[in-house]
Image: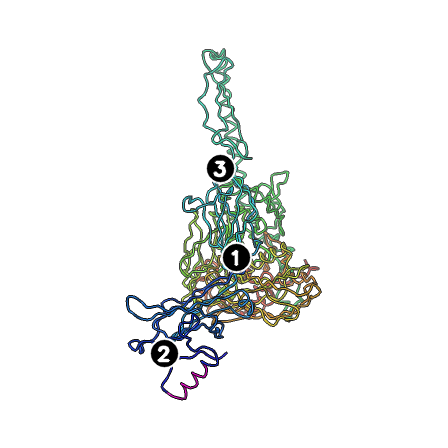
Amino acid sequence: MPLPPGPFVRCGFNAALLLLGLVLAGFTSTGGSEHAATAALPAAFSDMLPRFLVEPEDEYIVKNKPVTLTCRSTPATQIYFKCNGDWVHQDDHLIEHSVDPATAMPVMQVTIEITRQQVEKIFGLDEYWCQCVAWSTTGTQKSQKAYIRIAYLRKNFEEEPQGTEVALDQEVLLRCHPPEGVPQAEVEWQRNEDVLDPVSDPNFFITSEHNLVIRKARLLDTGNYTCVAKNIVARRKSNSATVLVYVDGGWSEWSKWSACGADCSMWRSRECSQPSPGTGGKDCQGLDLQSINCTSEQCPQTVSGAEDVALYVGMVAVALCLTLLLIVVVLVYRRKKEGLDADVADSSILTTGFQPMGIKPSKPENSHLLTIQPDLTTTSYQGTLRSRHDTTGKFSMTNGPLLDPLPNGSHTLHNGKLNSDPAEFVSRLSTQTYFKTLPRDVANTSYGTFNFLGGRLTIPNTGISLLIPPEAIPRGKIYEIYLTVQRKEDLRLPLAGCQTLLSPIVSCGPPGVVLSRPVILSMDHCFDACLDNWAVRLKKQNYEGAWEDVLLMGEELVSEPYYCQLEAETCRLFTEQLGTFALVGESLHMGAAKRLRLVLFSDAYCSTLEYNIRVYCMDDTQDVFKEVMQMERQLGGRLIDEPHVLLFKDSYHNLRLSIHDMPQAHWRSKLLAGYQEIPFYHIWNGSQRYLHCTFTLERLSLSTCELTCQLCVWQLEGEGQSFALDFNIAKDTRALDAEFLLMDSNATALAGPSAFQIPYLIRQKICSSLDAPCPNGADWRMLAQRLKLERHMSFFASKASPTSVILDLWEAQHFHSGNINQLATVMADIGKQEAMIFLVSDGEC
């Protein structure tokens, strides 16, 4: 179809061409016809450009009802619509002429109708848009583009709320992910069919992800909760989730004591009524009636004779003698015990039979330099370790795996794996005051009982571990320590402005325990590790639940209780205080980038024509990947390609996803647009843990099983990644999952020397050899340089034993992949052959 005529020009040749175009296209003026798109302008307005009074707006087609686009301009000789680059025929325009009463200027208005069939013609290729162009004798003007989309709302919720039982005043989180729809569905929540209004009842809060939060559960909050999604097409309701708020019983105050009765006793009572147990809550525990002996005139035993006085005096004298005897026994016991403690540190138990875990290297060429003879001059360990009576700062040792009671009151010292029963641990700690800092997610929790020998806690497949070096726990103390990764939705970390969460939220505790030296907490991060691009802060949650900045990375002070070693994908935190930690970053310029891990899943089995591909865009940390893998396994999903890493920059540009090159004879995309987009802030904030897009494909026959396509993910004006997919949807390849989720078979808790690659006695000799400054530099400073840790020289120098801290960091970095031969070579290069690490085979132990 030829282009519509523009304003007439004085050049005869051009005028002739325009006139010819008008005749051929049928666009010449027809006087008063309603389809005439051309009008003459009065001379007074001939030198003015057209100005739009009304421009076309975005519209949605609901079911099969066409939409109307309107364009109004003044002054204008012609107005025509162009849709997706093609001019709309004159006969499809409806034109109205009028005069502006205020300015006397001619006004032209044009409307067209767009049908569902027109939009569906470009299905899956691009978005359908229209734009109007106005002419005057002076020039042309274009309106804004109006996008026309087919509105819909799918039936099934992507995530529905689940019922729960909670105690009074506890927080409740009900999740809801509404069905896919255009326009995006709005969400409201109902309780027993009544709409909840967070404005009128602040106890309710609806998050940006449409989840419902009940800040403090009340009895009236018991009910059936429904998530309702609606847009201009339809209204969908999720299955109802029942929330039951229960009340545990509490005891009332004790009543006053009764009068002393004839039986020489008096009574008092209390009732389980403050509050009374309700809706399945626990009954009160303890006595509701209490009695004590008394004397009164009514009691026949009120008067004591002389013989009773003598009896009482005799009993007091016996008690005093027993007390003095007990004091003497305790003093003698403590003196013997102090002598025993001095021998334990250098005893043969610390070296005999222990070797690096999982490492059995062949003897190096200089093996004669790697062997030292045991020090036979020290007092040997006799096999039992008596426990101290000082309970200050101790925690419960009941059923502790490190010390098992012996009949004589001694304890056997164990070395190796601890029997981990997280559920029993959580139940046991529920009586402790610090339990409120520990979540009940036992699947992501590790714990163990430790003494001065130290140990290690690991949460498998998360990159999170806690190294407790030897002597970090004071001698005589035994701590039960836990390590857990918090779910972001369970523990809210407030972010301001352009701040973003760069690590998992990790808790270790109990908080408040006394440590003699720093422990090392290792956790993944997801930024480019360039501190020139970032201001990265370590945040710690205080006892009141508020978050505090405790460290600005790159500006650490050696006098502070926290210090960070930043690696390409890991942060190692030296801390003398246990608690809940997270890394929060704020970009300094648009070059700052987060690492996103792109992971593709599909349905393991497909018996319908529809086939879904889910693209997760998550923080590149192992803990998030582990959770997504576990969630997809429960959904019956399978991994269909290797994960890719994308650098997502702070450029305010969205993430775009598209699918291409499908065999059109067998497959088609049900996506209404040519691509999907994830808003920049949804990704940058880092608070949405399972952010993903779903591509719904449709095969034209159930016999079609081979799928080949190209799936592209890129940031606008930034980096991109593509997946070349070629697989059979009928074959289950879930065995591929284990290849990318590297299963960590190591124990979650190791206590004593087995938690370390360097034997305890050898470690002591290395420290004593390298801690003392050497004129030629052959000391701990050279060790730090050879291990590429020279950036932390001032931190190491601030410690009583710099070598010990360096070895702690080496242990934290190389627990799984450490090469003790390499460390031995470094020691040989330094020239400290007398402090070499020894290697023994199984036969030599």
Q: Is residue 521 magenta?
A: no
Question: Which corner quadrant of the image does residue 143 belong to?
Answer: bottom left
Asked if the residue at tag 3 contacts the one at tag 2, i.e. Cβ–Cβ closer than 8 Å, the answer is: no
Q: Mark 3 belongs to which amino acid?
A: Leu
Counting from the top left corner in percent of width and height, residue 495 is at: 43, 56
Q: Which mark is residue 139?
A: 2
**How many dots with numbers?**
3
**Picture residue at 50% right of the left edge, 71% below the top:** 719
Where disc 2 sits, the SS reads loop
Where disc 3 sits, the SS reads helix
Q: Which residue is under mark 3?
A: 219
Where are the magenta residues, as a range?
11-21
Dot 1: within a 10 Å radius of its alpha carbon, few (fewer than 14), some, or many (20 or more) residues? some
Q: Which mark is residue 689?
A: 1
62 and 390: which one is in front?
A: 62
Which label sits in the foreground, 2 or 3? 2
Dot 2: within a 10 Å radius of its alpha carbon, few (fewer than 14), some, or many (20 or more) residues? some
Q: CA distance from mark 1 to mark 3?
A: 31 Å
Q: CA distance from mark 2 to mark 3?
A: 71 Å
Q: Mark 1 belongs to which amino acid?
A: Arg
Task: Say if residue 520 shows up in the picture.
Answer: no
Counting from the top left corner in percent of width and height, residue 803 is at: 50, 62
Q: Is residue 546 left or right of residue 284?
A: left
Q: Which one is earlier in the sequence, the residue at label 1 or at label 2?
A: 2
